[in-house]
């Protein structure tokens, strides 16, 4: 079903203000980043040392990667709370695979994580898309199921760096032109998904579903299949992140990745991805992850209690949600022809 001529200009007119707001929000986050880094460096000049920046990027990389999959799900007006458990399960099973096969090539380990995460994401997608279970409920349930499976498999054990091949550990610590391999890989994934969401029909369908699911159905979009695909992508990326988590830290147990889901959601929402669906970019979500990472590192550098980091993350999340609500109401009034 095609839109009538009178409908097309209206949708285009709606898209331009949204894009302008997104660009303005991302710019404001970049400025906030610059101010925060400048103030912290003025207090402690070592904050922007080469080693500190390298550690910051490595710490943010895992969250930034999982944010990519979470963004796809949030664009559809859903949420995936199970990502932290998928990361933990993938990290330990990948380590166990290396223990059994020390000569396992890195690409196969990454593929193993992708497939494992895709299976977990498929379960989530089937529950949400075809089982009609609300995403919040479905993924909260699988969060505990996957974590329970992790504890059952680990059974009090632990994977240590001594059990892993040096070539695998060197991948995370190695670099190209001073940029860690892990960061380069995450940037490659982010750029790929940014192009996919912004330039291809499949990517644009996620925005359409989140903006108006009924209209998406009328436009011929297979909402259930696209929803399933979105959760599969989120799970696959979380599975990949689990392998990289193992390479980054070397030591994992059953609690690996615990609490990561809240950091990921906070980073995405702070970066401009709307919880109401249909609005947001990979770039904005990445900036949100970097902002939260810089805040955490700044507080550590300034020797502030860990509580402040959680409090600031919560405050930024509430602020971002409030901004989304205000913008949504203004957009609704504008479309209805009411006062702005």
Image (cartoon, rainbow, N blue to C red):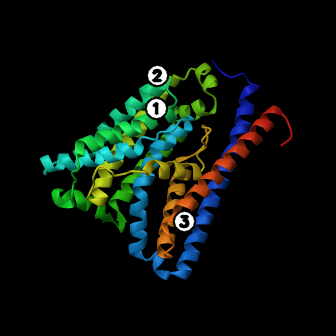
Residue bearing the label numbered 3: 308
For the point 38% across and 30% down, which residue is it? 122
Packing grade of label 1 (10 A; few <14, some 14-19, many >=20) is many
Please tell me which residue is depicted at 19% across the width and 59% down the height of the picture: 167
Task: Assess whether mark 3 and mark 2 are in contact (beta carbons under 8 angstroms).
Answer: no
Relative depth, front residue between 284 and 47 = 47
Where does residue 81 sit, x and y in percent of width and height? 46, 41
Q: Are marks 1 and 3 in contact (CB under 8 Å)?
A: no
Q: Nearer the viewer, mark 2 or mark 3?
A: 3
Left or right relative to 129: residue 153: left
Question: What quarter of the picture does the C terminus occupy?
Answer: top right
Q: Can the viewer see residue 107 in this picture?
A: no
Q: Which residue is mark 1?
A: 138
Dot 3 crowding, Cα within 10 Å, few <14, some 14–19, many 20+: few
Q: Which mark is residue 175?
A: none
Residue 278 placed where, x, y %? 60, 37
Tell which of 325 and 154 is nearer to you.
154
> Which quarter of the figure has residue 149?
top left
Q: Secondary structure at mark 2?
A: loop
* Total numbered labels placed on residues in the image: 3
Instruction: State the image coordinates of residue 47 (x, y, percent, origin top left).
Output: 47, 76
- Verify CB contact (< 8 Å) between mark 1 and mark 2: yes
Spatial distance from mark 1 to mark 3, Cα to Cα? 31 Å
Q: Residues within 10 Å of mark 2 (few under 14, many from 20)?
A: few
Tell which of 221 and 146 is nearer to you: 146
Q: Is residue 314 left or right of residue 233?
A: right
């Amino acid at each position: 079903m095609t839109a009538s001529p009178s409908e097309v200009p209206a949708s285009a007119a709606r898209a331009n203000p949204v894009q302008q707001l997104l660009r303005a929000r991302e710019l404001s986050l970049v400025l906030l980043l610059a101010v925060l880094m400048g103030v912290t460096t003025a207090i402690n000049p070592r904050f922007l040392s080469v080693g500190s920046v390298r550690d910051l990027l490595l710490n943010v990389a895992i969250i930034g990667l999982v944010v990519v999959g979470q963004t796809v799900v949030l664009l559809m007006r859903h949420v995936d709370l199970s990502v932290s458990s998928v990361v933990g399960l993938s990290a330990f099973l990948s380590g166990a695979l290396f223990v059994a096969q020390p000569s396992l090539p890195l690409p196969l380990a990454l593929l193993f994580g992708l497939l494992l995460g895709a299976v977990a994401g498929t379960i989530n997608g089937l529950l949400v898309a075809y089982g009609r279970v609300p995403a919040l409920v479905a993924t909260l349930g699988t969060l505990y199921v996957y974590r329970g499976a992790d504890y059952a498999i680990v059974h009090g054990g632990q994977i240590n760096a001594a059990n892993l091949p040096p070539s695998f550990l060197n991948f995370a610590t190695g670099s190209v032109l001073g940029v860690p391999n892990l960061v380069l890989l995450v940037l490659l994934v982010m750029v790929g998904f940014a192009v996919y969401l912004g330039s291809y029909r499949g990517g644009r369908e996620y925005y359409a579903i989140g903006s108006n699911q009924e209209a998406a159905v009328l436009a011929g979009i297979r909402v259930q299949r696209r929803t399933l695909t979105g959760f599969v992508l989120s799970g696959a990326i979380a599975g990949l992140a689990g392998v990289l988590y193992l390479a980054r830290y070397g030591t994992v147990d059953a609690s690996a990745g615990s609490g990561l889901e809240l950091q990921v959601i906070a980073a995405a929402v702070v970066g401009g991805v709307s919880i109401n669906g249909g609005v947001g970019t990979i770039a904005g979500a990445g900036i949100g992850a970097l902002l939260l990472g810089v805040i955490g590192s700044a507080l550590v550098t300034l020797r502030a209690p860990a509580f402040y980091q959680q409090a600031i993350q919560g405050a930024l999340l509430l602020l971002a949600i409030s901004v989304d609500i205000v913008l949504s109401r203004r957009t609704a009034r504008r479309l209805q022809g009411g006062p702005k």
